[in-house]
Image (cartoon, coloured by chain):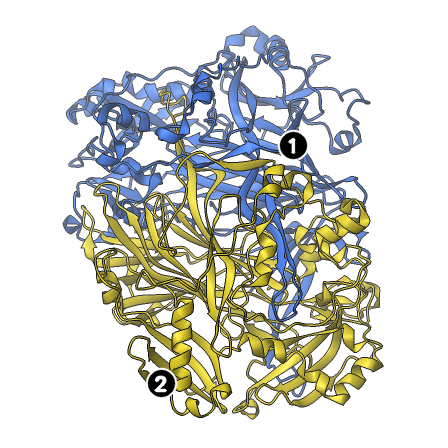
Chain colours: A blue, B yellow
Amino acid sequence: MDHSTSLLRLIFLALGAALVLLVLRSAFHLPRGIDTPTTSLFDAAAAAGSSCTRFAPWGCRKGDRTKPKPKPPSHETDVPRHPLDPLTVSEINRAREILRAHPPFASSPSSLFVHSLALDEPEKAVVLGWRRGVDPLPPRRAVAVVRFRGEAFVLAVDLAGGAVTPLPVPASGYPTMTMDEQVSLCFAPFADPAFNATIRRRGVRLSDVACLPISLGWYGPTEENRRLIKVQCFSAEGTANFYMRPIEGLTVLVDMDTAEVIHISDRGAGIPIPAAANTDYRYARHMQEEGDPASNGFQKVRAPSMEPAPSGPGVELVDGHTVRWGGWELHLKADARAGMVVSRARVQDPRTGAHREVLYKGMASELFVPYMDPSEAWYFKTYMDAGEYGFGLQAMPLVPLNDCPRHARYLDGVFVAADGRPYVRENMICVFERYAGDVAWRHSESPITGMDIRESRPKVTLVARMVASVANYDYIMDWEFQMDGLIRIKVGLSGILMVKGTAYSHLNQARDNEDMHGTLLSENVIGVIHDHFVTFRLDMDVDGANNSFVRVDMARQETSPGESPRRSYLKATRRVARTEKEAQVRLKLYEPAEFHVVNPTKKTRVGNPVGYKVVPAGPAGLCRRHHCVSPIAGRRGDALVHHLSVALE
Amino acid sequence: MDHSTSLLRLIFLALGAALVLLVLRSAFHLPRGIDTPTTSLFDAAAAAGSSCTRFAPWGCRKGDRTKPKPKPPSHETDVPRHPLDPLTVSEINRAREILRAHPPFASSPSSLFVHSLALDEPEKAVVLGWRRGVDPLPPRRAVAVVRFRGEAFVLAVDLAGGAVTPLPVPASGYPTMTMDEQVSLCFAPFADPAFNATIRRRGVRLSDVACLPISLGWYGPTEENRRLIKVQCFSAEGTANFYMRPIEGLTVLVDMDTAEVIHISDRGAGIPIPAAANTDYRYARHMQEEGDPASNGFQKVRAPSMEPAPSGPGVELVDGHTVRWGGWELHLKADARAGMVVSRARVQDPRTGAHREVLYKGMASELFVPYMDPSEAWYFKTYMDAGEYGFGLQAMPLVPLNDCPRHARYLDGVFVAADGRPYVRENMICVFERYAGDVAWRHSESPITGMDIRESRPKVTLVARMVASVANYDYIMDWEFQMDGLIRIKVGLSGILMVKGTAYSHLNQARDNEDMHGTLLSENVIGVIHDHFVTFRLDMDVDGANNSFVRVDMARQETSPGESPRRSYLKATRRVARTEKEAQVRLKLYEPAEFHVVNPTKKTRVGNPVGYKVVPAGPAGLCRRHHCVSPIAGRRGDALVHHLSVALE
């Protein structure tokens, strides 16, 4: 529940870096217009990150400024070096050629729209059997989701032989929107005179309007068999933060295939567009135009006064996608839908030196963001950020120094535009060693024992990070690998709230606070109650692929009369899930349980199955929420696949 | 629930730094005997931390080794500079003189035992009104808890005038054990021939026995009106990690006042003492005696390869106890019972530059650790680590570089021995700026909007840390202050498990796994199921002392027919607690709620009360557990006092 009340509190304590956007001042105009997305090979926007961008007096030092901007790596000559390596630029081009030559698409290649084109990963057994530097790569195949003349196809493409094999198409649903669609649909309403008239009636210049494509959810069979989208618009006049200036109550229903406006719903009579003043969040603009941003109530931003400097071996990146660090070895890649995929995470056994399997494949599988306002302009806002918008497609280049620490290593993403051409998203993933000043393990002996022991080891970890900016929200996805073998997944929520316009400028105008479906954040701005559910797909391979899901329940056990001065205690009961159903868990706070992934075929010295613990993350900090932690396990081939919801951190 | 199954899994993945103690090898003997605690002014043990102690090739660099060891600060000349500053060495000496001269203690000063002696803090209004550098300090008073000839007294001591005023003594219960008692009681059993005979029957040399004083819990009125303790013993032969070698089933009941053995319970027939092999955890010993620790299965320990180096303003420490950093100002001190006390935490309003109150006083109020084994030798293990053992008394000097990062600042604790004399615990608290490579706030615009915006600010925070080593467990208490005004409390659990001996050396010998009350961790060693409950006392002063506790419940609300295509949504309901009872919360995972502390007398621009959100921490990571998060609020004077349980991280 992202109940924004709490956010409000912080704003008016003037404390929220995440919220400063609401207390800013700005006096400039935006560059106008909405560009079509780049499908050029190199993402021009990426350049923004490569020079010194840490604001504030301490961030940019001479060394940073004079460092020559490195030339973007050429991905044109990339070749795959690992069975799980993503499709390269030339492989994508090859797949495109094959698809466009494939009947029936060959009749009209320009009518072929590629919604997804990615590596068709080899079977697990093939990947596990492959030896680096010894074996040739297994045959490279792509799997494509395309639309052609209103029909969707799922196709396997053999890149060497050129064969195209149809795969089953799901009975319902539509493919992820292409970036091209997401952009072009924002312009669809402007072709409709009634829409333009509505905008003018509100006193907004058409050139100031910015729109977003909003997925519909599903509210009954009448909406089926037609690809539809709702478009909501904002005024970008006077601020880059148009999210704070909703043209409330105006919803345009658009056919995604024809770009035709089907219906305009206008329920916003009497709701003013919130003012632009104090909404811009760009630090550089403030520094430039206003002098000291702090004097305007802009949250003071502080660069670290302790900067990490190299003092030992760092992160090793082998063949572009294999990361080695601290006994860990794993494969890392960008993915258009999941954002980032971690594969074959293995950790070294200190006794034998051998690498032992932990995780075959892990990734975010969905982000579900339902808003809790049943009114006409809001009821349908139940975004699936990964499946509908593409979590990787929404990932922008990371900002060195600010998004990732100095000395981070970066990986690019290679994605596919609607026309099937490859494009590069630079600096999409960063990998770095983290030392946060924490303790990995420690023990001191107290005077009770008289032993003078002070043992302590610092906690050093490996972090792989990507950030998806799904319109207003920025999801920071961290996979953290600990020296003790634990993997933690952390999801940070940043960016800007999706707000609702209101006629109220003060709470004393509201008859019933609770009917606002949120909190009055500023004049004419309501933060609507909503939630962020993040689910992960974790294909655990603890010491091999044969894994079981074990639930350990702790329940009150009464003692027998005379057994003990204690009346009760908590007793653990282990249950191995035999079916998917049994592995579905509804967590209960006062009926504690633990969840283990074990390999029943591998036993420890004293006879316990080798295993791993799944720890559902709880809520912590500013923007994270009442967690709906529900690991759901299912079998996929011989592997146990977990979908684990974790809370945002 | 610290169900140790999960720990086991990790061990045999050979991954657990927290667990390496179980897979180590060692071949040396301990220095024998248990010393009485130091009551000298300077803690000799502190010296261990001041030189270069970071193991592993990268940790110790030349600069570290050659740095001269700083002379320990002399606290003899300390004077208080803030109304909340703890008692100084000379103030403690003065209080001791006053108490020893006070009738009836004057008749036999050596019979007076000081269980606690600490600053009697001035009233909040006095503290809030005091201006640094302008006003003299308010009168300094101490509050003492003493025992004299079997009777407990709570006394206010006026340090200037010398008056001693009796305060009400609680109707039941006993004061926190003194460190002297905790140590000396370990020796009590050896005076009993029956005990010594039992030890010898088990084939253990008396000189190898190490004992611990274990609080009794409360199991009925028969145990009342007598200060009792149970002593449990271990064999320290062949390892510093005697915790892994319990003399199982042997429990000695001792009268704390007479040191007399009242009862010996010996239920351990047939349970061998687990072997010493592979239990030692001291890295240096392994380096020294075995060459490469990793070759023995010792978890590889890695120093950070990125070390923080100063590049800007760091943490400012004013007058010894006031910390200033990043707009924050707070008072920090060591406390014998709570460990660390944070007072008057205020943060700068970026618009006005003024400091606004957030927290008047915050500290850990208790740590409750019940074990879930009803058998004779374990049923009573329900430790209250703060109230019974003294969380501050158990805090050992921090290990620079390993417990806290380079450039941390350290604060000492000044405590009081049973005879009333002061002693110093050096480097008990550290304060440092943390930069973990995280993002405080960020937003990128996606190609959908066509705006080329990449805003990101690094997350830099202030951390105040202390670590209490309550026998086997080490609690790492972090208070983290964010630039956005948020305070996070994190409790890390480290150290060694409290284990139980068993006749089983393999799981196949156990008839019913579940009746072990834990997990077979190693041959003859069971990790017993237990839990760690940490409660905090938070006296919030959000924008002033008048604060209310608000509960925001999110509940399913059905829509009316025709109201919306949605059938339901979550609706928020705010309830201001009018009584303590109403502020007691039983968290429910599927009935989400938020908790705010608001100042109803201060309103934001749009009319909401200024407030702060209380976020109960969830479980995350290795050793933290099913959280029992239950904020309990009570009124104390004009301030709302929260006891908030948080889970261990």
At numbered mark 1, what does the secondary structure look like: helix, strand or loop? loop
The residue at 43%/89% (across/down) is B105
Q: Is residue B50 visible?
A: yes
| Mark 2 lies on residue | B168
Q: Nearer the viewer, residue A617 or A435?
A: A435
Taking the spot 17% from the left edge, 22% from the top edge, the residue there is: A200
The quadrant holding residue B38 is: bottom right
On screen, residue A158 above or below B26: above
* Foreground pick, A640 / A19: A19
Query: Which amino acid type is marked by label 1?
Result: Pro
- Where is residue A445 drawn, in percent x and y? 63, 64
x and y percent of residue A559 in the render?
64, 81
Is A372 positioned to the left or the right of A584 in the image? left
State the SS at label 2: loop
Q: In this view, does B631 lie above or below A113?
A: below
Q: Which chain letter goes with mark 2?
A: B
The answer for how far apart the CA atoms under marks 1 and 2 are is 61 Å
Q: Which three-letter amino acid code belongs to the residue tagged 2? A: Pro
Query: Is the residue marked by circle 1 packed among few (<14), some (14-19), or many (20+) residues within 10 Å?
Result: some
Tell me residue B492's x, y (percent).
54, 56
> How many tags in the picture?
2
Q: Looking at the picture, how far across and down is residue A41, in whole percent?
A: 52, 12
B559 horizontally vs A92: left or right: left
Residue A377 in view in this figure: no
> Do the residues at pointers 1 and 2 share their chain?
no
- Chain under numbered label 1: A
Could you say which disc has been placed on residue A313 in the image?
1
Comparing A604 with B215, the one in front is: B215
What residue is rendered at 51% in x and 20% in y? A425
Q: Give the crowd class for mark 2: few <14, some 14-19, many >=20 residues within 10 Å.
A: few
